[in-house]
Structures are given as structure tokens and as C-alpha cells.
């Protein structure tokens, strides 16, 4: 009887010990120690007095906006989409002329009609051939309304068919406040907002031939090689490389701009739009828009800073397990970015309990994934810890 009780007691103890060993241990706790940089609480911007403006950084995202950002007439800024769509249908490399189109007597009649109405035009002659490169220069630098219609007829057979393609492309690009009724922009039914036009500018400027043409201060045109100046009078000043202007009675002065900047080791591009600027007797509406665009570029440039978001070897989190000493998760690469005041930086540490993890950093529209590694391996709970925990 005593012997049976002894073995029964021993069994109970062994069962209790086995249960203690088998009982799940507490998971290690992770505490993020990383502090993201802040450049300030307010972006200092003197926005234009005109109805709508928008400013962005690439890479980076939206910096700020002024006005309701609703659809308003954009004038010859329309030709940015006309040129972009031509290049979607007929890609062209730098140094190439591309296919040519013959100027018809109807094209000459339309040129004369536009000229008599004081529209922006580029002279054409019946029978002459305009290469694709020439058409793009006539659109983006000379801003010829007649060239826009020649291009539309060439690509789609008619301005109406081409305009349908323009609206389809705008929808595809996410230009939700944009609608076109023609390829030139003369009709005030061509409407957009600064955000949409900036989006298109960023997309178009990824095309090398587009980028090369819009930065030209003038082009040589026609049989007489007459020089036509770019309506973007500030191109080449303050590092401005484009993109397109517009100016009509209904649209006011419009300017969609781009300006690369070197900040630390980074090259970024400031993009933006100023739409609907009214002029005065002393200063035309287009000059107002150009001045305001240049001002926005310089104001933002002065507030951009290159900032290290994480350094290789930097501790981003501590891990505490009750059975061992504290260990650290450390970054395996360095990340820096160009930031502006008020830009939010968010970090998230991912760790599944093994020797590695991942740090996700988000700043504006940019994201980085940084691999993490434990400073030392995290040991498994020892037998003595399993037996004595909670006692």
C-alpha cells in the first residue's frame, strides 16, 4: 500500500513537471525605439492669388494646394495631352524625325483663319511635310492651334475622334476633373484642375523626347527657319525645364511647371500648376502665372532637406523575453530622403519571432522596406526556466 502511494505520488509530480514544461511560454515583447525626423510644423508658402494652384515633389508626392482644385478652363495647357497621346500612338526616340504628314490646302486655310483670329499658330504651306518631331515642337513650344488639328487628323482621322482618345487617356491616368472638347485648348470646354495637370506633366516628362522639347527656349520653323519663342518665357531660368503654358480670355494665365533640384545626394523634381491667373494693364495674365510658378518653385526649394530616415546598424526595436537578456533589432541598410516641413513619416516594424524582421517606412508617396536582424540570436527557453517560471 505504501509502495503504491509512493509511486502514485511520484506520478503526480512527474505529471505536474511535464505539464509545467509543456505549458506555453510568454511571447517575447517588441518595443519600437525608432524616432522619425520632423522638419517643422508648418510649410511656409505664399500661394498665388489666382483661383487654383498645386505643388508636388517627385519622388515624394503632394506638397500642398490652394483653391478648390475644381475643373476650370486650361487653354493651351491642353496641348500637353495632345502631344502625350501622339507619343503613346507613335513613340519617338531622341534624334529621330519619326513619320511625316503632308500639309493639305485645308490645313493652310485653317492656319490663315486662326492667324486672322490672333490665335497662336505655326505657319504651314500646302504640300510641305511635317515630321512627328516637328509637330511636337509646333505643339509644345510654338503652341500652334493649327498644328494641334493637323496632329489630330493625322493620328485619328479627325479632331472629334482624337478628342475621344484624349478623354479616354485622361480617365486611364486618373485625371478625374479633366474633360476635353478639342485638341488645341482654344475652346473653354477644355477643363481640368491643377492636380490633374501636374499628374499628366509628371507622366509626360518620363518620355525623353517630350522632356527634351519642352525645355527648348525657341524652335526654328518653316522654310524661312523663322525662330519661334517658347511661351514659357522662364524655361531655363532657376532650373525650370518645362512644361506648358496656356492663356485665353476664359482660362486666364496657366502654367504647368517642372524644376529639378539637387538636395544632398538626391535629385528631385518640383512639379506644379498655376491656373486661372488674371492679368493687369501692367502685367499680362500669362506673365502672372509664370511669375507665380517660379515663386512656388523657389519657396519650396528653400525648405527641402535631405534627411536620414535610418542608418545601417541603427537599433530600431528592443526585444525582451523573460528567459533571457534583452536583444535588439538593427537595420541592415541606410535610407535617406528629401523631406519638407509637415511631411509625415511613418514607420512599422514587422517581426515574427525569428532572427530577422522588416522595417517599413512611409514618407508621402514613397515607401522603403529595410531588412532587420537581431543583434544576437534569441535563445529558446531553457528547461530550468520552464520548470521554475511562475514559482
Image: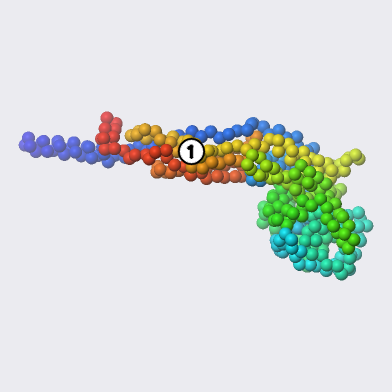
Could you say which is closer to the camera, residue 218 or residue 170?
A: 218
Residue 288 position in % (x across, y down)? 83, 41
Mark 1: few, some, or many residues within 10 Å (few <14, many ≥20)?
some
- Residue with the most extreme left position: 1
Residue 8, image x and y in percent?
Answer: 13, 38
Q: Could you say which is closer to the camera, residue 8 or residue 320?
A: 320
Asked whether the viewer can see residue 211, the reply is yes
| Residue for badge 1 | 313
Q: Position of residue 317 (x, y in %)?
A: 46, 36
| Residue closer to the observer: 5 or 245 | 245
Q: Position of residue 353 (x, y in %)?
A: 40, 42
Q: Residue at x 72, y 62 (%)?
A: 92
The quarter of the image holding the N terminus is top left
Residue at figure coordinates x 73%, y 36% from the top left: 299
Viewer can see residue 275:
no
Residue pictured at 81% horizontal, 54% vertical? 141
Q: Is residue 155 above or below residue 228?
A: below
Amino acid at each position: 500500500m505504501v509502495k503504491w502511494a509512493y509511486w502514485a505520488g511520484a506520478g503526480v509530480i512527474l505529471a505536474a513537471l511535464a505539464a509545467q514544461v509543456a505549458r506555453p511560454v510568454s511571447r517575447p515583447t517588441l518595443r519600437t525605439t525608432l524616432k522619425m525626423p520632423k522638419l517643422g510644423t508648418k510649410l511656409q508658402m505664399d500661394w498665388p492669388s489666382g483661383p487654383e494652384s498645386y505643388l508636388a515633389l517627385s519622388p515624394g508626392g503632394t506638397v500642398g494646394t490652394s483653391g478648390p482644385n475644381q475643373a476650370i478652363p486650361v487653354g493651351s495647357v491642353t496641348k500637353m495631352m495632345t502631344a502625350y497621346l501622339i507619343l503613346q500612338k507613335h513613340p519617338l526616340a531622341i534624334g529621330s524625325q519619326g513619320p511625316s504628314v503632308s500639309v493639305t490646302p485645308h490645313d493652310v486655310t485653317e492656319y490663315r483663319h486662326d492667324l486672322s483670329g490672333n490665335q497662336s499658330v505655326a505657319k504651314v504651306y500646302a504640300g510641305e511635310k511635317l515630321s512627328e518631331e516637328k509637330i511636337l515642337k509646333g505643339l509644345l513650344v510654338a503652341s500652334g492651334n493649327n498644328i494641334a488639328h493637323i496632329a489630330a487628323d493625322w493620328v485619328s482621322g479627325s479632331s472629334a475622334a482624337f478628342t475621344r482618345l484624349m478623354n479616354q487617356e485622361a480617365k486611364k491616368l486618373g485625371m478625374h476633373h479633366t474633360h476635353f472638347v478639342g485638341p488645341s485648348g482654344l475652346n473653354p470646354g477644355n477643363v481640368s484642375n491643377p492636380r490633374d495637370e501636374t499628374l499628366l506633366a509628371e507622366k509626360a516628362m518620363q518620355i525623353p523626347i517630350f522632356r527634351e522639347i519642352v525645355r527648348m527656349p525657341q524652335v526654328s520653323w518653316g522654310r524661312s527657319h523663322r525662330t519661334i519663342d517658347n511661351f514659357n518665357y522662364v524655361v531655363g531660368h532657376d532650373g525650370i525645364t518645362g512644361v506648358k503654358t496656356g492663356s485665353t480670355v476664359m482660362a486666364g494665365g496657366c502654367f504647368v511647371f517642372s524644376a529639378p533640384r539637387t538636395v544632398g545626394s538626391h535629385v528631385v523634381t518640383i512639379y506644379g500648376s498655376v491656373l486661372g491667373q488674371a492679368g493687369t494693364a501692367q502685367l499680362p495674365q500669362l506673365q502672372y502665372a509664370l511669375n507665380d510658378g517660379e515663386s512656388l518653385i523657389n519657396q519650396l526649394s528653400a525648405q527641402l532637406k535631405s534627411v536620414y530616415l535610418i542608418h545601417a546598424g541603427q537599433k530600431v526595436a528592443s526585444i525582451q523575453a523573460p528567459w533571457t537578456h534583452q536583444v535588439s533589432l538593427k537595420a541592415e541598410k541606410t535610407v535617406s530622403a528629401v523631406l519638407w516641413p509637415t511631411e509625415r513619416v511613418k514607420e512599422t516594424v514587422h517581426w515574427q519571432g525569428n532572427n530577422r524582421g522588416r522595417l517599413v517606412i512611409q514618407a508621402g508617396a514613397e515607401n522603403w522596406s529595410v531588412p532587420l536582424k537581431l543583434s544576437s540570436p534569441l535563445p529558446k527557453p531553457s528547461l530550468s526556466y520552464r520548470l521554475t517560471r511562475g514559482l
